[in-house]
Structures are given as C-alpha cells and as structure tokens.
Amino acid sequence: MGRTLTFEIFRYNPTADDDRPRIDIFQLEETARLNIFTALNLIREQQAPDFMFDFVCRAGICGSCGMMINGRPTLACRTLTSDLPNTITLYPLPFFKLLGDLSVDTGVWFREVAEQIESWIHTQTEFDPQAEEERMDNATANKIYEAERCIECGCCLAGCATAQVAPDFLGAAGLNRIGRLMIDPRDQRDEEDWFKLISTDSGIFGCIGMMACDDVCPKDLPLLEVFAYIRRKMAAIGFSKKKEKAAAV
Ligand code: SF4
Ligand code: SF4
Ligand code: FES
C-alpha cells in the first residue's frame, strides 16, 4: 500500500479583501510515479476547487510550474513525490508578484528585463531574404544553443540571495541572456555597450558568485561557464579602460 502524503500548502488570494495568508493541509494517497503536477490537480479536483497554480506543458518545457517544494525552487511537473518525505510543503516562488496561492507572475519581470537589456540581435546588416544563411562555427553555435535552453521558470531568481534584496538585479536568467548575446557574432554591440549594460551592481558585479542558481536550475544550464565568460570579458574591458586613462594622464 502506498504512503499517505500530507501537503502543507500556502494559500492566499491577494485580490480578495477578506482573505489572509495561511497554510492549508491536504492528504492524498500516493500512487506510482505520482508527481507534484498530478497531485495538485487531484487536490484541486477533489478538495479545493478554488486552488490556484500554473501549468502548461507538463514536460519541463514551458517554465510555468516553478514553486518552492520543501524549501527548494523547482518545477512541479518534474518532481516525483517518491523523492520527497511524507510531508510536502509548497510555497510560491519568492521575488515574483504573487497572483494567488502558488501562482506567480514571472512574465512581467522577464519582459521588463528583455526590454532593459534589449534582448535581440543588434545589427546594421540589412536583411536580404535571398542571401545564403551565414555560417557559424559549431562550438559557438553549441554555446548559444546551451544558453537558449533557459525556459524562464524563475527558479534561479527565487534561489538567489542578491535578487531577494536587490529587485533590479538581473539574476542568473538575465545574465545568461546577456551572455548568449555576447557570444553571438551577429550581435554588433561593442565592448563599451556591453560594459555599460552589465558592469554594474544590478549586473555581473552584483552577483556574489555562490552559484545557488546553478544548483537549482532545472535545465542544468552552464551558468558557471556563462558568468565566468562575462566576468573575464568585463575585467578585460575594465583593465584596458584603466590603461587608456593612465596613458592619457
Ligand atoms: S536559468 Fe535555469 S532556473 Fe533560471 S530561468 Fe532559466 S531555466 Fe529557469
Ligand atoms: S551566483 Fe548567486 S548571486 Fe549570482 S546570480 Fe547565481 S544565485 Fe544570484
Ligand atoms: S508545466 Fe511546463 S514546465 Fe512544468
């Protein structure tokens, strides 16, 4: 016979005047290969029809089911109850705006960051639909592909100490996006542009480098590598700026 699981779940509807944050407790019989996605749907169907949480793909692709599961930011659809103890606590991701219960709005933050860092290829080259596609070497293409695997789930922001105290910090997801564009030879932004964009406390120098983001990223993005690349690049630009300044004196 399977275990009886106890779910301790944060509940709060910020749009209802008479609601207050609380923990609701639900029990569910564990079945084979039960994941948190299915468990929450069963709880909503059988015990709490007004329960709010987000899912789309159920396959670790859409990034909408991020939540704190026993204190760790992760994807509900990729978490099996068999990997957890009898009591499972669920909270919404911190850092993002709470919409209700376990549902948060990651979209607004990601859109604002995309606009702030101008998250698109900057090029003066006119688009020619007849031209042959430009070639790129495999190593560069692979690095871009790796960084592009981010599903914007927000788990790295929820696990980041800096992000909790500095809401304008770009976080691992924002820095990863910048790294992706810096690697891309088609983006014609120069060193000065990159330096202005991220050599700040809300950029790479706000990052304390303890790599909690790397520990919790459910897509195992090579964040450590991307950050090292950005730091090296920023340090080199900063050093050459210093030399130029010294030479001018
Ligand atoms: S870097 Fe990883 S944890 Fe952060 S948003 Fe992207 S996929 Fe999620
Ligand atoms: S290394 Fe630490 S401070 Fe930097 S983005 Fe990752 S979690 Fe945040
Ligand atoms: S439902 Fe899409 S990532 Fe979990």
Image (cartoon, rainbow, N blue to C red):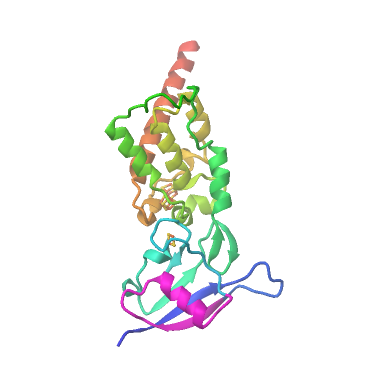
Instruction: Examine the rendered structure and indicate whether residue 127 appears above or below residue 165.
Output: above
State which region is magenta: 23-50
Asked whether, in this view, residue 186 is left or right of residue 110, the answer is left
Q: Residue at x 56, y 50 (%)?
A: 109
Along the line of sight, the residue nearer the viewer: 20 or 3: 3
Q: How many marks?
A: 0
Q: Position of residue 69 (x, y in %)?
A: 43, 68
Q: Residue furthest front?
A: 130
Q: Position of residue 42 (x, y in %)?
A: 46, 78
Residue 138 visible from this viewpoint: yes
Q: Residue at x 40, y 35 (%)?
A: 230
Residue 166 visible from this viewpoint: no
* Displayed-image quarter of ligand 3: bottom left
Instruction: Examine the rendered structure and indicate whether residue 76 appears above or below residue 200.
Output: below
Q: Residue furthest bottom?
A: 1
Magenta-drawn stretch contains 37: yes
